[in-house]
């Protein structure tokens, strides 16, 4: 089955630690995105990637980092510089980022800072 | 402020009734999309309407777009308990950036009582 997978589903982090969230897609999509969702809120764009080995900052990139070494994978690292990382993180992909078309979402990772 | 703002923030109806959600936005758009999110899950794309379209249907869903008023509405007819979810509108800007960025509203929480 084609789709987007995210792991883990739940993640707990101690203050000062970096953690990496996984996102994998087998849809052969060029573009991938990371969003953050806080309770009762919409989605805010953290980073996006239009093609392998390229990525750009979104609206709230501070304290986060990404890589795009493979077309299928777009991991997100939440660094200790992110002051309020507790949130629900969603990864998405789309066929072509040149046109704002349908985005396909993974199931999400809920990150909690202890 | 949010590009897309949904109204109402929450809607509670009985099974069989129709549900209408509205979305307003501020800038010129290429298209507007509606997504659904079940609690704690990823988003699922429902429908996309382009700026040159006025109305679109998909099953029990009907979306309208009024670019002169910068607003859209999502109508769910004959609602079911399984329609209980949060619904988000997302807009794709018409100009400026060349990538497929979507700006999400804060969502409408729909509860359908059996």
Image (spheres, helix red, strand yellow):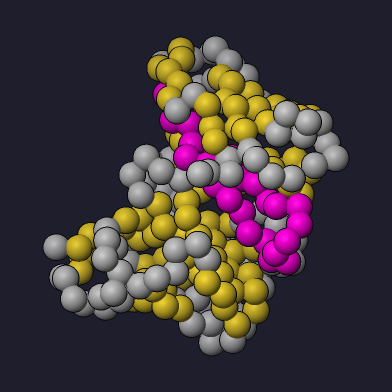
Q: Position of residue B2 (x, y in %)?
A: 53, 43
Q: Is residue A37 above or below residue A95?
A: above
Would residue A24 be visible to someone looking at this image? no
The C terminus of chain B sits in image quarter: top left
Q: Which contiguous range is marked in magenta?
A: B89-112
Q: Quadrant of residue B33?
A: top right
Expressed as whole percent of the image width and height from the top left, the position of residue A48 reads: 56, 70
A11 in magenta: no
- Left or right? Give the position of A43 relative to A38: right
Q: Residue B95 location, x and y as percent?
A: 76, 57
Q: Quadrant of residue A29?
A: bottom right
Q: Is residue B98 magenta?
A: yes
B110 lies above or below A106: above
The residue that appears at 35% across and 72% down in the rendered structure is A63
> Where in the figure is residue B8, as x and y percent of width and height?
49, 24
- Given residues B39 and B67, the one toward you in this image is B67
Front residue of A87/B37: it is A87
**Looking at the picture, does residue A12 appear above or below residue B57?**
below
B9 is higher (above) or lower (below) than A12: above
């Amino acid at each position: 089955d084609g789709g987007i997978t995210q792991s883990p589903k739940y993640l707990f982090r101690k203050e000062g630690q970096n953690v990496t969230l996984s996102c994998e897609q087998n849809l052969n999509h060029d573009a991938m995105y990371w969003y953050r969702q806080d309770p009762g809120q919409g989605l805010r764009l953290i980073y996006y990637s239009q093609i392998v080995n390229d990525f750009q900052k979104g609206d709230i990139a501070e304290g986060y980092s990404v890589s795009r070494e493979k077309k299928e994978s777009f991991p997100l690292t939440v660094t200790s510089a992110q002051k309020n990382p507790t949130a629900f993180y969603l990864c998405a992909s789309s066929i072509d980022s040149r046109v704002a078309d349908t985005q396909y979402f993974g199931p999400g990772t809920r990150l909690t800072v202890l | 402020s949010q590009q897309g703002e949904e109204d109402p923030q929450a809607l509670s109806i009985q099974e069989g009734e129709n549900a209408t959600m509205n979305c307003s936005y501020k800038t010129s758009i290429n298209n507007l999309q509606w997504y659904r999110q079940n609690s704690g899950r990823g988003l699922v794309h429902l429908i996309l309407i382009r700026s040159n379209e006025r109305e679109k249907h998909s099953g029990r869903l009907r979306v309208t777009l009024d670019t002169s008023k910068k607003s859209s509405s999502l109508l769910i007819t004959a609602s079911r308990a399984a329609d209980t979810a949060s619904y988000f509108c997302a807009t794709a800007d018409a100009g400026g950036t060349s990538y497929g960025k979507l700006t999400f509203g804060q969502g409408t929480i729909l509860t359908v009582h059996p």
